[in-house]
């Protein structure tokens, strides 16, 4: 603990020395530009959560809070002494490494002439980064083509195969030229391992698509903590190894791939049989690498003796994608992903509002300013905060979230969460009028429509969404039944690419959005009656990484890495999950007769469900295990 405390002190002093803090008297547009240019600079190397650049960015934001004299969000004891800190630490799995011992691969092959050959470490192999650890004893192999089973696509690589207690060998990927958006595109290594396990297999060997194994992305030990581990121990093996196992040369291996591509056409009848007398055993022993990640929390206490016991959260995530990889839309790029719009823009607006409110000191309610880490990794920071809040959630009356607010064009502004509180829409409509005539709101509880001057005109072309769930940190708060508003100026061609740079920000537009959000916060703050939480209409499934034909209405917790079920942070009201009796905090362990260990297992099974069909779902609630019935709804 002391070592960590000292490292944070060192971090803050270092960042303070390199961060040119701007005095509070500077014009707002210059403040916004300064924050964006600095956070999106090369110094922070793309602010990937858990990496040095993101930690420095957290320090910069903490120093800015200190400069504005906000109170620290957290207090703890270090060596018996009080320690006030803006940083809320949460754990992050950053990747995996092969342990020095416990990783091996052995292959016994019987040739046509009866000769037995044994191959060991000279065979090229690598555990995939999300493989569970385990020892797979000498087992027979069964070849399962691409390892795909789909009732919807009327395709089954396991037809007439017995994989029980055997090791499945299958090609990675799909047929040649399959794109990630094709019908077969969602059958990745996670999915294939799940299918193999459901067929009774004890291990999975995926034959690489790359000519050199080291060029295969699965050989690079990547680990996505939001998806969790594969269902069974899984290796990626070289094409030479695959050919040896299947008792053929690499030319024969290529011919099989070509043949399998034809099998995917239901009008083509292909008889494919591979006879191999190979016996394989292997061991996987991976060590997860971990790092500390941070939310940055600053508090401005309210001035009203009663209302200061309630809080409004104003948030934005500061993390981005580092030098690419998971989440990047620049394929194979290792350049810095600057993240000026996503989301240095939102952080700059949040910091500017913190400066203004702290200077005025007129807020009646307590204002909590939060820069979230881990948003790009699956809302990890905001999920951690709502489960470990600096201020009681029961007293948190609203959450305002800004994510990508720097590219205002044609005055188009999207606002989500309109349906999460009674009267949100009336408030937004009123504040969107330019001249302010007739906008004095006397009863903000329901935000009644306001009388307006005929000369008034709209400041923004608004696109409103009722849903409180969405692809950003407000989701974590709405899952706790807190009214939310989400501000977003739209996506663009630089999204999740290195080209999202500070010079492309519309700073006057960013200032306009910041002013608008500030007025809305003041209106909420001025009303002695807190916003009334309401159930918002859904705009579609939340939390998935791909499209589905059905929805259950669940909100997964992406931070839970126990691989013993899918923990739910929320359940949509009036959704199939809610109707079945599922509650936030439940852990789904089985769906449609298949085990669920994590988000990956859940999404794989969800992709095969049919709307209107009843399925059995098993959840763990505390010490209880409940078996319920659920009927998926067609996704709109």
Image: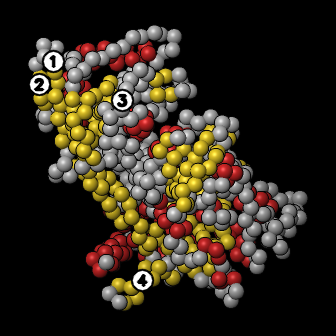
The relative height of residue 67 versus residue 94 in the rendered view (above or below) is below
Q: Are marks 1 and 2 in contact (CB under 8 Å)?
A: yes
For marks 4 and 1, the one nearer the N-term is 4
Q: Quadrant of the N terminus?
A: bottom left
Q: Position of residue 55 (x, y in %)?
A: 37, 66
Q: Is residue 491 left or right of residue 433?
A: left
Query: What residue is pinned by disc 3?
Result: 163
Residue 286 seen by the camera: yes
Foreground pick, 61 / 25: 61
Question: Label 1 to label 2, Cα distance in Å?
Answer: 8 Å
Question: Label 2 to label 3, Cα distance in Å?
Answer: 24 Å
Badge 3 density bin: few <14, some 14–19, many ≥20, Cα 10 Å: many
Query: What residue is pinned by disc 1?
Result: 111
Question: Label 3 to label 4, Cα distance in Å?
Answer: 54 Å
Q: Position of residue 241 (x, y in %)?
A: 21, 27
Query: Of the residues tagged 1 and 3, which is closer to the observer?
Result: 3
Q: Is residue 568 left or right of residue 244?
A: right
Foreground pick, 247 / 471: 247
For marks 4 and 2, the one nearer the N-term is 4
Foreground pick, 154 / 439: 154
For marks 1 and 3, the one nearer the N-term is 1
The relative height of residue 546 versus residue 628 in the rendered view (above or below) is above
Q: Are marks 1 and 3 in contact (CB under 8 Å)?
A: no
Residue 76's disc number: 4
Residue 117's disc number: 2
Mark 2 residue element? strand
Mark 3 residue element? loop
């Amino acid at each position: 603990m002391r070592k960590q405390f000292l490292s944070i002190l060192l971090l803050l002093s270092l960042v303070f020395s390199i961060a040119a803090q701007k005095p509070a008297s500077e014009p707002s547009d210059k403040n916004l530009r300064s924050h964006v240019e600095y956070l999106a600079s090369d110094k922070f190397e793309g602010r990937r959560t858990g990496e040095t650049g993101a930690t420095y960015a957290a320090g910069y934001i903490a120093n800015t809070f200190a400069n504005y004299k906000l109170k620290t969000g957290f207090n703890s004891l270090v060596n018996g002494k009080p320690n006030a800190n803006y940083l809320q630490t949460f754990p992050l799995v950053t990747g995996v490494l092969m342990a020095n011992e416990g990783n091996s691969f052995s292959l016994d092959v019987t040739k046509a002439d009866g000769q037995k050959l044994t191959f060991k470490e000279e065979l090229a192999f690598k555990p995939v980064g999300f493989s569970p650890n385990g020892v797979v004893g000498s087992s027979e192999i069964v070849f399962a083509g691409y390892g795909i089973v789909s009732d919807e696509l009327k395709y089954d690589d396991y037809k007439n195969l017995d994989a029980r207690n055997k090791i499945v060998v299958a090609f990675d990927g799909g047929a040649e030229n399959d794109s990630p958006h094709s019908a077969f595109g969602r059958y990745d290594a996670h999915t294939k391992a799940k299918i193999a396990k459901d067929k009774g297999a004890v291990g999975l060997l995926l034959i690489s698509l790359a000519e050199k194994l080291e060029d295969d992305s699965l050989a690079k030990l990547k680990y996505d903590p939001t998806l969790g581990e594969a269902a069974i121990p899984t290796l990626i093996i070289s094409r030479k190894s695959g050919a040896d196992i299947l008792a053929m040369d690499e030319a024969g291996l290529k011919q099989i791939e070509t043949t399998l591509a034809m099998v995917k056409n239901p009008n083509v009848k292909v008889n494919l049989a591979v006879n191999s007398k190979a016996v394989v055993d292997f061991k996987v022993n991976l060590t997860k690498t971990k790092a500390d990640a941070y939310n940055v929390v600053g508090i401005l206490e309210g001035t009203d003796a009663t209302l200061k016991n309630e809080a409004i959260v104003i948030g934005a995530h500061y993390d981005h994608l580092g030098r690419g990889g998971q989440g990047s839309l620049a394929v194979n790029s290792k350049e810095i992903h600057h993240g000026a719009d996503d989301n240095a823009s939102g952080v700059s607006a949040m910091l500017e509002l913190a400066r203004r409110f702290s200077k005025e000191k007129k807020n009646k309610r307590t204002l909590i300013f939060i820069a979230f880490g881990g948003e790009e990794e699956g809302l990890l920071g905001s999920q951690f905060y709502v489960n470990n809040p600096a201020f009681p959630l029961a007293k948190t009356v609203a959450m305002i979230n800004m994510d990508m607010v720097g590219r205002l064009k044609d005055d188009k502004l999207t606002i989500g969460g309109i349906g999460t509180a009674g009267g949100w829409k009336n408030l937004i409509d009123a504040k969107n009028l330019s001249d302010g005539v007739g906008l004095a709101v006397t009863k903000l509880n329901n935000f009644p429509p306001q009388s307006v001057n005929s000369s008034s005109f709209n400041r923004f072309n608004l696109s409103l969404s009722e849903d409180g769930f969405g692809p950003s940190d407000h989701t974590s708060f709405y899952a706790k039944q807190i009214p939310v508003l989400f501000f977003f100026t739209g996506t663009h061609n630089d999204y999740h690419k290195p080209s999202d740079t500070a010079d492309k920000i519309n700073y006057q537009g960013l200032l306009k959005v910041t002013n608008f959000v500030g007025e809305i916060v003041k209106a909420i703050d001025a009303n002695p009656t807190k916003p009334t939480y309401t159930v918002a209409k859904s705009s579609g499934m939340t939390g998935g990484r791909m499209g589905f034909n059905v929805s259950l209405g669940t909100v997964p917790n992406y931070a839970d890495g126990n691989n013993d079920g899918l923990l739910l942070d929320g359940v949509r009201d009036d959704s199939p999950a809610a109707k079945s009796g599922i509650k936030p905090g439940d852990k789904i362990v089985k769906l449609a007769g298949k085990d669920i260990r994590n988000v990956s297992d859940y999404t794989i099974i969800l992709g095969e469900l049919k709307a209107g069909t009843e399925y059995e779902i098993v959840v763990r609630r505390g010490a209880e295990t409940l078996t319920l019935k659920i009927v998926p709804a067609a996704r709109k």
